Amino acid sequence: MTTDHLRSTGSGSGPGDPVRPGGLVLPRYRHDDPDTHPPMLHPDYGSTNLRAPRQPLALLPHRLTEITGPLLGTGRLGELDHDLTRQHDGEPLGQRIIVHGRVLDGNGRPVPDTLVEIWQPNAAGRYRHAGDNWPAPLDPNFTGVGRAMTDGDGHYRFVTVQPGAYPWRNHPNAWRPAHIHFSLFGRAFTQRLVTQMYFPGDPLFFQDPIFNSVRDPLARERLVSRYDHAVTEPEWALGFEFDIVLRGREATPFEDGDDDD
Amino acid sequence: MTERSDPTPALGTTPTLGSTPAQTVGPYLHIGLLWPDGPEVVPDGTPGAIWIRGQIFDGAGAPVPDALVETWQADPDGRFDHPDDPRGARPSDVPGFRGFGRSATDVDGRYGIRTVKPGSLPGPDGVPEAPHLNLSIFARGLLHRLVTRLYFPDEEAANAADPVLGSVDPARRATLVASPAPDGCRLDIHLQGTDETVFFAV
């Protein structure tokens, strides 16, 4: 297919344009079970009340803009972006941890070469952010931002410190369970995901409306990392494993033999 | 935790894995998601560059000062430098074109992206899509991203024939069409209320 007929930005195109239907076989991504993701309106989390849309969502079919997405390269990464304990002159205080895992799609295939961004508070539960001023200390040796690319097997690895829990004003005596924010691109606009990783057995889960906004208990469990003794390094750091599953594709006859992963 | 499926099975025979649920970016997203060049889909000085600007409002009409807008779009020829485009991946003729933009809102809820206008796109059913950007919106209080689209005010005929715009309630269609501005165009986003923007399940 030539691109000449696409050159006009719309004014000259119409239904009669010579787009060969057979030339545009597009992958489609499966829709997640309705209880996998939180509802937009979740009154227990007060900030949703004025921000969640009240109209039903319209369905966006998967066309070219949806099945493509930014493939951001290693050019965005600095040498120490994956190691939050080595970004300053000294080491941050706190329990040193290794957080690693694989990024997979819903078909179980690794998502290679995709950007993973994380951010978190320090060991005392304080973010390095103008908006966070509760009376816990800042750590001059901790910024709390990390970036990494997955390798060919979809694997990523960060070194950081165990984030602290922190209070917020959502409800009386409200505390966020310790968590690390994760941002993922996958390979398509449909796969974009921002989530939070929690730690196993956190006693604060019961009162946290953000964690509990996920209705399906099995889906909620997928937000919790696993202590990983095999990755724990003697006399150095505790290991935690957190696999992330992005939406998989619908199986179609056209994709048999697809080896683009 | 997620199950491992090893060895990786062929597509079509795969038991599906449940997706990891979304969670809000929270109020401190700026630590992790701001890039110095985030709003620059194209470099400074790109011929034909435009600014897409707007404000985000909550259900009380107050500006949302802690949101992030991300944009994704084709280049002016309607092409993507992406292997899943069945026409083939093609680097843009526009030097430095990234296709992707990211802008946090300021204290007044304002965002801004410098880009070039995308071309129209062929559809799988032969019906072309009018030039558009896909937008993702993240914020405290949004447990999952919101997805919307931006269409251009000078594409009346193409917009009228666009299959996605055509699928939207005519009374709310205008929430997806930007208005002209001196250096580009403007699209405000209303999370709730009588002018609530049309958001999509993608």
Image (cartoon, coloured by chain):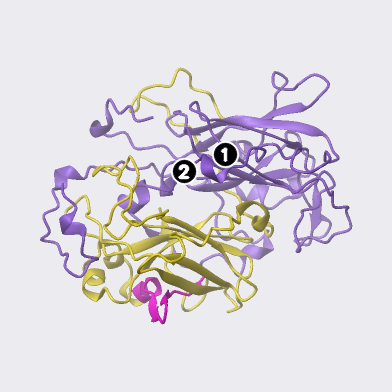
The reply to whether callout 2 and callout 1 are in contact (CB within 8 Å) is: yes
Residue at horizontal 42%, vertical 63%? B148
Residue at horizontal 76%, vertical 63%? A130
Q: Nearer the viewer, residue B161 or B87?
A: B87
Residue A227 as seen in the image, left or right of residue A64: right
User: How packed is label 2: few (under 14 Cα within 10 Å), some, or many (20 or more)?
Assistant: few
Please identify the quarter of the rendering in which residue A52 is found.
bottom right
* Residue B181 inside the magenta-drawn segment: yes
Q: Is residue A122 visible?
A: yes
Q: Position of residue A199 (x, y in %)?
A: 72, 36
What's the colour of chain A in the image?
A: purple
What range is drawn magenta here?
Answer: B172-190
* Residue B174 inside the magenta-drawn segment: yes
User: How packed is label 1: few (under 14 Cα within 10 Å), some, or many (20 or more)?
Assistant: many
Tag 1 residue: A219
Q: Amino acid at mark 1?
A: Ala
Q: Nearer the viewer, residue A89 or B155?
A: A89
Distance (Cα) linking label 2 and label 1:
10 Å
Q: Amino acid at mark 2?
A: Asp
What's the colour of chain B in the image?
A: yellow
Q: Nearer the viewer, residue A203 or A178?
A: A178
Q: Which chain is mark 2 on?
A: A
Say which mark, if any, is on residue A33. Answer: 2
| SS type, badge 1 | helix
